[in-house]
DNA sequence: ACGGGCATGTAAGGGGTTACATGATTCT
DNA sequence: AGAATCATGTAACCCCTTACATGCCCGT
């Protein structure tokens, strides 16, 4: 899967693995992410498969830059994958939900409430992130690269993030109330 | 992490790995899941660590039943873990969001809309599942095992599932409209 | 007759994380 | 003075999935 994410980013224009990582951290971070130690080897394989072409830019004091550009074959692989229908729902693993589910094993209701309040803080921060930083990132990207068409999709996924966080926060507030009253 | 999930289920009462798997499929399935091929080896290690005690019930035509019971040490390990605060937000990987984010690479808007409609079908089914099957499962479990206290937590996580699906569906509907209009 | 439930496991491989390695420049 | 940014990678390890292996009983 990472394969296609990388092709997807290369489709915006030629860039290095390091560049892709930075962009990922600012955009797909919350529904897709990867480390450099996974990105570099994956990119390396692309050349063999004819999905990309590489230009090496020598540098001093740093490793040489490897600028990857997507090929026709690469673009074809990407669009094929995008067109495939997704038949499985994503199987999230959420330790917080899991802990709450199993919290019958805890006698101390204050402990559970502390956990939930802590989560509220984290999710409120992330909601703010989607409402501020992400909006700014998208705007900046539109200005720099003239990508009105793409921006529709970026905004849609950003909006999902915002709505998701809002729902999570409401639910946490509801959970706090329920536990305070019923436990 | 699976370690604690298994301890959590064993805390409801002694049972086999097969039993745990069945219960998991009916309850935590959507925020935590595992295969039998992972559950069995993990349970096996517990005995060595003194977290469980095993009773072997001979059977014919089937492998002998191994009924695991949690020990004091096991319960302590479980409650310690439950009390630990979660500092990371769960990093979901959602291929649908990812594809939509990268859909600028597709010229054919109908393809994108088809994908979204397909997702709507899947999520509506799952919403119904949370509203029907899960409710029934919880009720059945309360009747069978006298677990009013635990049921508060089960209902809270079920409720999360319902709200999450509702939000996802609303967002998909919004995405469909946006693409129909703006693309 | 065939599929599903019961009940246990092993082995191979894929995907991902963590740790290690290098080294100049720029910001705080 | 120390951290962050730039820029690449390798190696060990862990978690998880997929495939394989066995075999009876029950329902349709």
Image: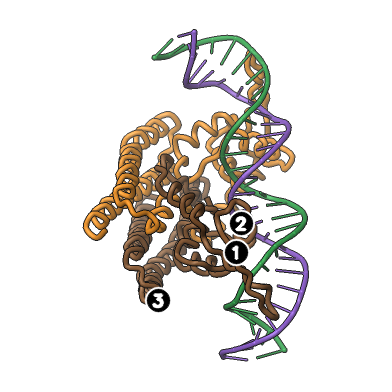
Chain colours: A orange, B brown, C green, D purple
Q: Do the residues labelled 2 and 1 touch (CB within 8 Å)?
A: yes
Q: Nearer the viewer, residue B114 or B62?
A: B62
Chain under callout 3: B
Residue A61 location (% of width, % of height): 63, 13
Q: Looking at the picture, tell me which residue is in the foreground, A128 or C21.
A: C21
Residue A11 can be seen in this image = no
Q: Characterize the local packing of mark 3: few (<14), some (14-19) or many (20 or more) Cα atoms within 10 angstroms.
A: few
**Residue drawn at x 49%, y 49% as measured from the top left:** B77
Q: Name the residue under label 1.
A: B54
Q: Name the residue under label 2.
A: B47
What's the chain of the residue with tag 2? B
Q: What element carries label 1?
A: strand
Marks 2 and 3 on same chain: yes
Q: How crowded is mark 2: few (under 14 residues within 10 Å), some or many (20 or more)?
A: some
To the question of a shared chain for discs 3 and 1, the answer is yes
Q: In which quarter of the image is the C terminus of chain A?
A: bottom left
Residue on which disc 3 sits:
B144
Residue B80's tag is none
Q: Whole-Å distance between the Cαs marked 3 and 1? A: 24 Å
What chain is tagged by disc 1?
B
């Amino acid at each position: 899967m990472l394969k296609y994410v990388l092709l997807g980013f290369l489709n915006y224009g030629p860039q290095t693995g390091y560049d892709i990582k930075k962009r990922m951290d600012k955009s797909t971070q919350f529904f897709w992410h990867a480390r450099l130690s996974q990105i570099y080897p994956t990119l390396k394989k692309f050349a063999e498969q004819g999905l990309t072409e590489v230009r090496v830019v020598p540098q001093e004091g740093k490793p040489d830059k490897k600028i990857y550009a997507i090929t026709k074959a690469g673009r074809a692989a990407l669009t094929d994958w995008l067109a495939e229908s997704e038949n499985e729902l994503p199987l999230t693993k959420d330790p917080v939900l899991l802990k709450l589910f199993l919290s019958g094993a805890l006698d101390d209701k204050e402990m559970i409430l502390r956990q939930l309040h802590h989560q509220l803080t984290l999710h409120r921060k992330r909601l703010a992130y989607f409402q501020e930083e992400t909006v700014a990132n998208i705007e900046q990207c539109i200005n720099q690269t003239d990508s009105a068409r793409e921006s529709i999709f970026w905004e849609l996924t950003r909006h999902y993030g915002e709505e998701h966080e809002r729902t999570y926060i409401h639910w946490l507030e509801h959970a706090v109330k329920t536990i305070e009253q019923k436990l």
